[in-house]
Amino acid sequence: MTRDAACELCAQPGGLLVHRTARWRVIRAADADHPGFYRVIWNAHVAEWTDLPPADRGAMLAAVEAVEQVLRDRLKPTKINLASLGNVVPHLHWHVIARFEWDARWPQPVWASRQRDVAGAEQRLALPLDLLDQAVARALAALA
């Protein structure tokens, strides 16, 4: 795996580390407006989806699917947003975001301007974030 000390995603996990394998890791992003926001990050410098061999694409997509399923089962969101749109870091990564009609930017994308102020978004979730992280970690561990 290539590492670069100047690369943000080589130097640090990129959020709260939930699960790590030799090829990829899953973090929860620190986003008060969207507390159910996870990223599946490829550990090595790979910029594009088709740069990964098919077996690696399958492994990464399985992780994305596992995170999505936990969010759907545990949080019952209005929608799940999936996106792979990193332009700044050379690490392929997928955003897996639980969205709710009450969230600050609904129905716009998470990077859009706020549509409303929402206090205590984390407390609106069906379970505490530490328990959600544990459920995500269990689902990811089951992939091995």
Image: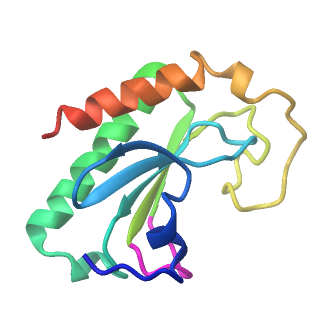
Relative side of 1 to 96, left or right: left
Q: Position of residue 144 (x, y in %)?
A: 13, 40
Q: Position of residue 86 (x, y in %)?
A: 51, 74
Corner quadrant of residue 61: bottom left
User: Can see residue 43?
Assistant: yes
Q: Residue at x 81, y 27 (%)?
A: 120
Query: Would residue 51 be found to the left or right of residue 40 on screen?
Result: left
Q: Is residue 61 above or below residue 75?
A: below
Q: Quadrant of the N terminus?
A: bottom left
39 w.r.t. 130: above or below:
below
Residue drawn at x 30%, y 81% is 2
User: Mainly helix, strand or loop, the magenta region?
Assistant: loop
Residue 79 on image: x %, y %: 53, 38
Instruction: Place residue 44 in its image quadrant.
Output: bottom left
In this view of the protein, which residue sits in the foreground, 105 or 123?
A: 123
> Which one is in front, 68 or 52?
52
Q: Which residues are magenta?
A: 84-91
Name the residue at 70% across, 27% down: 122
Res 67 → quadrant: top left
